[in-house]
Amino acid sequence: LDMLSPRPSEVERRFFAEYDESPDKAFDGLYELGVKNDYVKLSAIRKNKFWIAETTRNKIEITINLSKPEKNNRLTAKLRNVSAGYPKCMLCRENVGYVGQGRTRRNMRTVPLTLAGEPWFWQYSPYAYFYQHGIAINAEHTPMVLDGGTFAKLLDFVDFAPQYFIGSNAPLPIVGGSILAHEHFQGGHHTFPMEKAEKEFGFEVPGFEDVDCCVVKYPMTVLRLNSTNKQQLCDLAGKILSKWRGYSDPDAMIFAETDGEPHNTITPIARMRRGKYELDLVLRNNLTTPEHPMGLYHPHEELHHIKKENIGLIEVMGLAVLPGRLKKEMADLKTALLNGEDLRANDELAKHADWAEGFLKRHPEFNADNAEDIIKFEIGQVFAQVLECAGVYKPTPEGREHLHKFLDCIREG
């Protein structure tokens, strides 16, 4: 299929010819090529389960991803290390057309980008989580970084592709993504629950009068900035990042660092909305404690039967990417509950026993006709708890009091 696909130079020529007509047309054409040459694994993607769940605060999206292995935090941390191989990782542009050892993506096709004056490129994800899920990748194999320049790169991308959102994982283990060894962003043509979340309250920052600021009504702590002034937006985002990185509040269990290990970072997301640039800055912290060795602001242990991986960019925005094992486990759970079986006697289902006993009390109507819908609904409630665990300031009066202390710190200069 690589040999049957257009040459990379021809793909680029066609992309920019179509881009002169419309960004949508250019990106649609590149995506269609990826589907036709089987780089975008549409047949595998269609096997994934997907549904929308109602929670008390927001609608959230759930997918059981059959192609994605379940990882742990130790493996994620190892993936920060730079490989000495060729290509150095699965994101490197050298994968295009390279036969290698069979682990590379030779039928991949990319287009070049310039973000904040640096050479980058865009490719689509072979195992997408949403429509036209793509990756903007630094042309140089360099580790993930988050600094003031990150916001300029994100906003440059939405200038180039205003129909897409773009976001970056945080560059720290536990709160970051699965590939920290190569700087990249993820984006695409999708409106996530976080984007739909409403304003909770506004705040102002002196010296940044061109930027509208608010806190979003969402389980995680999201500061939303809107402006037509790109430079002011970048400057304020950089200021918030700098303040947050050095911020500690022991009463709120927030520590900038312990034993020299940094904890505070941000997951940023950029988009265009009604002719304005919009940045969502999600406050993150990767502190561990004896009670929560995998992370205090990480899914707590009682939720690991559904989700134990770190909460990266996609989950932050309200799409739960759940492990493929759940497809069989939930089908088996449904059968076992309808048959009145003892879940604790089943090695595979025992981890779901406490959860199932709890939701059966809330659903005395549970029967063969509604069992699957109830199980899906309850998975949604678990993921809502996962997001609340990952939120550094809880959506409670006490949590909001602590958040206002940090906002005062931003305003003070």
Image (cartoon, helix red, strand yellow):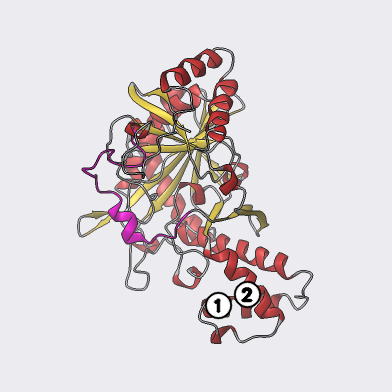
Q: Which of pointers 2 and 1 lies earlier in the amino acid sequence?
A: 2
Q: Are marks 2 and 1 in contact (CB under 8 Å)?
A: yes
Q: Residues within 10 Å of mark 2 (few under 14, many from 20)?
A: many
Residue type (three-letter) at the residue carrying disc 2? Leu
Indicate the quadrant where residue 412 lies. top left
Residue type (three-letter) at the residue carrying disc 1? Leu
Eyeballing the image, is 19 above or below 172? above
Q: Residues within 10 Å of mark 1 (few under 14, many from 20)?
A: some
Q: Which residues are magenta?
A: 68-92
Q: Could you tell me residue 328's position as x and y percent?
A: 59, 67
Q: Kindly state the secondary structure of the residue where label 1 is placed.
A: loop
Q: Kindly state the secondary structure of the residue where label 2 is placed.
A: helix
Q: Quadrant of the C terminus?
A: top left
Question: Residue at 67% of width from left, 79% of height from top?
Answer: 337
Indicate the quadrant where residue 120 lies. top left
Disc marking residue 4: none
* 78 drawn magenta: yes
Which residue occupies the foreground of this view, 89 or 187? 89
Q: Could you tell me residue 185's position as x and y percent?
A: 42, 37
Question: Residue at 55% of width from left, 87% of height from top?
Answer: 345
Which residue occupies the foreground of this view, 323 or 319? 323
Question: Residue at 57% of width from left, 33% of height from top?
Answer: 36
**Mark 2 highlights which residue?**
333
Q: Could you tell me residue 91's position as x and y percent?
A: 36, 38
Q: Is residue 369 left or right of residue 27?
A: right
Q: Is residue 207 among the parts visible in the rendering?
A: no
**Mark 1 highlights which residue?**
349
The Cα–Cα distance between marks 2 and 1, rounded to whole angstroms, is 7 Å
